[in-house]
Image (spheres, rainbow, N blue to C red):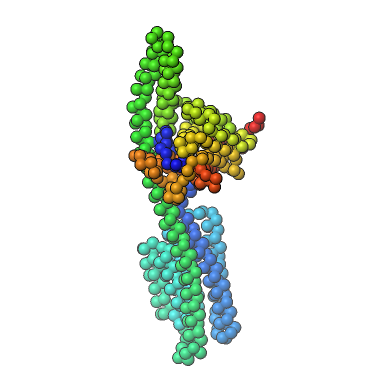
Amino acid sequence: MSIAKTDPPAPLPAAAGLAPGERRIAGRSLDNTGHKNMQQLIQLRWIAVLGQLATISVVYQGFDIHLPLRSMLAVLGCLVLFNAASMLRLRLRHEVANGELLAAMLVDVCMLTAQLYLSGGITNPFVFLYLLQVTLGAMLLKSWSIWTLVAAAACCVGGLAFTAPPLSLALDHDSGMASVYIQGMLVCLAINAVLLVVFVSRISHNLRARDAHLADLRQRAAEEEHIVRMGLLASGAAHELGTPLSTLAVILGDWRRMPAFAGDPELVLEIGEMQSQVLRCKSIVSSILLSAGEARGEAPVETTVCGFLDDLVAEWRATRPGAMPILDYRNEFGLDLRIISDSALKQMICNVLDNALEASPEYVGLRVRRDGADLRLDITDRGLGFEPAMLAQLGKPYQSSKGRPGGGLGLFLVVNVARTLGGRVHAANLPEGGAVVSLILPLESLTPDEDETEGELDAG
């Protein structure tokens, strides 16, 4: 059917935990919602600076209302300095905690209170801007911080009501729409509405992105736990199989030397084939234990991209009967590069090749090339291709139409190995028929830790 529908020929017990050279390249899991929300507050503060400058100019010059310009501009200057310091802090450190957001909003409330105190206090129509601060706080802060902000805003309003001298324009509110106070209040409400729509929408988008990020992390944790359990099972099975396989190898060696078998060439060939299959089983067991961190064989060794893939293809052809003429291997990588050979990486590629062979016994294609800073392997077949439902659930466990227990784990393990290396897996159906699975791995995660810049070798 398709490449994703077959069981893996060899399990990958440490798919979620090992990378070449025992280095793990994990995706960034830090939550940057606080950083984005602080950016929104900084933008809002710049709008507040411009709005206050415009309002002071209009009121002072247009309505001929006396204002303490020097003091109000000094408060505005402090707001500008604080906003500049906030921008510098974001550049120096990415994470923003709830306490920092609360402190920033309390500063905004204090600055607004200072400006209102200098311009009429509770009689200033722009006193409703406190609602903007409280609403944003309800979106951004934790529960206890919200109530702290509400208490601070309430204290500030109460202080203004008792201490701030009133504005003269507050006395003309009986004039209806001709009242300067009513006009100012309408302008304030319009500003509140516009800013709330814009910034609440942005903050909601940030929160939705955070929730989606956390859901993805929970899904990845569940998948990695699933793989760990599979690894424990595979490691235990490998331990149990080690002794029987060694016993079989000894018995087959004795049979080959016995006169009754040695005199029959056909039996000698069959015994030799049995010995090679036993050796292959022992190699698989060793690879399982190596991937699980219990190295029975050799540790990962330094090699090159072309050398690793050439050896992998040669071994795959030799251990799959009839695969020699079927595999169309094209290495277009170019200048070779040193990498660390790892059993999990090898098993990942072999899994996809084996699945392709089962889906398309007459043809399997393997194309290797360099895609920017990535190693790209395209494995194609001429089978029936993927079903749309399986493409939509690529990399999810037990997505198989074969009906066998444990079916559909092949691409699930492949995707998790690739993700551990910082790479990705893409699958699609080909227009001419068949399917292609692309393994895209960053070369940085495969190269040795030291002397990475000196890894280019002569292709010849």
* Residue 79 percent location from the top left of the image: 53, 68
Given residues 97 and 207, the one toward you in this image is 207
Residue 293 shows in this picture: no
Given residues 293 and 6, the one toward you in this image is 6
Residue furthest to the top in view is 259
Q: Left of 158 or right of it: where is 58?
A: right
Q: Left of 426 or right of it: where is 134?
A: left
Residue at 55% x, 78% y: name it. Answer: 55
Given residues 60 and 265, the one toward you in this image is 265
Quarter of the picture holding the N terminus: top left
* Residue 311 percent location from the top left of the image: 54, 29
Residue 411, quarter of the rendered image: top left
* Residue 340 percent location from the top left of the image: 53, 33
Residue at 64% x, 35% y: name it. Answer: 335
Given residues 451 and 260, the one toward you in this image is 260
Residue furthest to the bottom in view is 175
Quarter of the picture holding the C terminus: top right
Residue 229, compared with residue 40, is above or below; it is above
Residue 269 shows in this picture: yes
Residue at 49% x, 28% y: name it. Answer: 322
Residue 44, compared with residue 243, is above or below; it is below
How many marks do you count on the picture? Answer: 0
* Residue 324 percent location from the top left of the image: 53, 29
Residue at 55% x, 58% y: name it. Answer: 88
